[in-house]
Image (cartoon, helix red, strand yellow):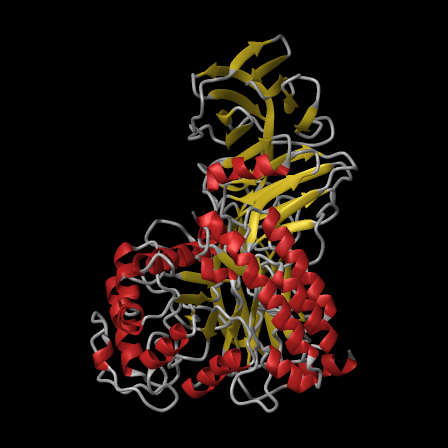
Amino acid sequence: MILLILLFNFSSVFAIDGVWHNPLGYENLYSENEMLSIEKCERYPRDPTAGEDVYIKLTTWPIEPGQATWITWTKNGIPQPDVGGEWKYNEGNNSYWEAKLGSFNKGDIISYTVHANKDGANEKTIGPFTFTVTGWDWVTDVISYTALGNRFELICNSHSGNFTPKINICFPEPDYFRLQFAPDGVGATATGSASFTVDDQATHIWLSTSDIKLKINKNPYQLEVYKSDGVTLIAKEYDRTSGRSLAFLTDGTSRVEAVEENFYTPANEKFYGFGQRYNNLDKRGTNVDIYCVNWYKDQNDKAYLPIPFYLNSNKYGFYLNSTYYAQFRIATDEADKCTIRADAGGDVNKLLDFYLFTGPDFKTILQDYYDITGKPVLPPVWAFGPIISANEWDKQSEVEDQIAATINYDIPTSAIVLEAWSDENTYYIFNDASYTPKPGNEAFTLSDFTFGGRWPDPVGLVDYAHDNNIRVLLWQAPVLKHTLTPHTQKDNDEAYAIQQGYVLGDGSGGVYRIPPAWFQESLLPDFTNEDAKDWWFSKRDYLFDDIGIDGFKCDEGEFVYYRTTTSSDGKKGDELWNAYPAQYLLAYHEYVKSKREDTLIFSRSGNSSAHLHPVTWNGDQRSTFSAFQDAIRSMLSASMSGVPFVTWDMAGFGNDIYPSAELYKRSSAQAAFSPIMQLHSEQSGDPYPSHARTPWNAAARLSDYECLTVYRKFANIRMNLIVYRSKIHK
């Protein structure tokens, strides 16, 4: 501390060059693993609520003695005393300045500017920045109701008295209902069946179908859900004497930042689902984020495939119809309360929209859930056979050797995935191919290429695989990749895509570029733009039409940061974050099916539509028994969330450790009875020894021939089971 004080009182001849503050940072929920670098100059919290202390974090450059930082600011237009910055270090030992503004009331509007100088001179500023403080409001009691035939509408009071919220309830089927909550009374008009009755009592209203009864208490408002006997409780909103339900985070006038529901949950209830979850099946006692994230290994509670749907052990299911970030706080705030909270993007007209499914069993609940989200799509029959891949297979001769090995060792194999096939610039041209670059609006045909080097004959390779009943999938990522060196075809494509508006925008008339993460500075194609989709896939037509591939392995998709990011369908970044993976993957699924019916995409990210682009693997796993357990839990969790065709990289894929013989053999047995059976390895290039998880390589590396015989045994069992699975397709 003495040294630090001396440092900052020591006069220096250098001048301050600048000061930096980015109020919302990269808007990532997590930090390590997700981003390559961490923004340390944010406002905390990014969106302050009433009573929260607000901190302004900033940095100066270069870092030198004699500097000072401070904040000038106003509250509701009235100037406030300046606040000086303090020198701080974060967990990564990165230095920054921090100024504490204090806490505020709902509706306060704060405007501030960041200042810095050195030795009292050469002042630098950034700003002004503005935020509006929000606070919670909620429904208190029912004013009136209207039965509209195919829906039921309630007009309510709010706690603040500034809003007149509306609740809309409809019954798509007798055993489930949809509830829409409009904080400002606008919208919420979903309809269902007219087969329900209304019984208005002095203190409450009964809405009844043949299967369920809803009791709506008037003052205070509270919803209770019963079986048809009106006695057996299924679920109910939390007790109004100690909490709130149907709440909204607002500035009190024109903004709604979040919406919320609270359910009572007795201690014996368990909560399953929420997409692909690795650490435990029952989520009671945890906060579950609905946030699609690229999280390399050791995912724990992080998810590539989050789904705002859960199954409750009291035989009901809940689906939040939103792609905004949401959090389920399950018996963490109170032992008997489950809070469902979703962002609303600051839009006063956004709704809380959810379905509550009842039924005698989970199968019925899932069938009803599929009525809303769509029935699962069956993969082609061949996809149920063993699938092999390895990043190190980066040339045709190596791939042909692997196909030959499946024959020589009599190992059943239905498909091979080529990850390292492309030029790593366009992701649609084979590595080492020679060609004359085309304008960005034009597509290639096979005759435009002269193949050589690593991939001298792609057609011959695919034919060789097909002759041996092996399908071929190629790796993809949804990016126009940023490179530091010129690449004419990629540059032509990028310029054309920007000109035509085929990529996501930044909200200010420019294009969105990925912040410091995988594929930093790359562009994202806008899959909500039909012309953009047609253009994007036209570049890939020759892979199907001329070469004959069978589909794609679609990696990534967790790339949309910043709430200002825009797509052509009008969504902003905070709503796009969880929506973009589905847009990307459904577009690819639709495309490959337009080529041939027996094609497939194989994906990692997604949301509640993941069962519509049917095969999903659970991401990046270490080759350990602990990761094996994580993988099993994630597949079970995804299946309970309505995603049936799931898999993992058998025995793990990481290059940090090769699986033991015991892990390999047990994983082979498990994979044979999983929805999809596949293996993959991370290491690229030409590693020695090979990192491939193929049974012949595992037997050689581990000096255990049983790795091969055990895998062969279970792969054959797998192939025999396909006979039964194929009957589903008839």
Q: Which residue is drawn at 58% across and 43% down?
A: 309
State whether residue 588 is above or below residue 235: below
Q: Where is residue 443 in the image (x, y as percent from the top left)?
A: 23, 71
Q: Which residue is drawn at 32% across and 53% down?
A: 568
Q: Position of 268 compared to 187: left or right?
A: right
Is residue 469 shown to the viewer in this render? yes
Q: Could you say which quadrant of the image residue 677 lies in? A: bottom right
Is residue 293 shown to the viewer in this render? no
Q: Position of residue 611 (x, y in %)?
A: 49, 50
Q: Could you say which quadrant of the image residue 651 lies in? A: bottom right
Q: Which residue is drawn at 52% across and 59% down?
A: 616
Q: Name the residue nearer the viewer: 488 or 614.
A: 614
Q: Name the residue nearer the viewer: 94 or 460.
A: 460
Q: Where is residue 536 in the image (x, y as percent from the top left)?
A: 30, 65
State whether residue 125 is above or below residue 367: below
Residue positioned most to the top: 202
Q: Could you say which quadrant of the image residue 226 lies in? A: top right
State whether residue 488 is above or below residue 675: below
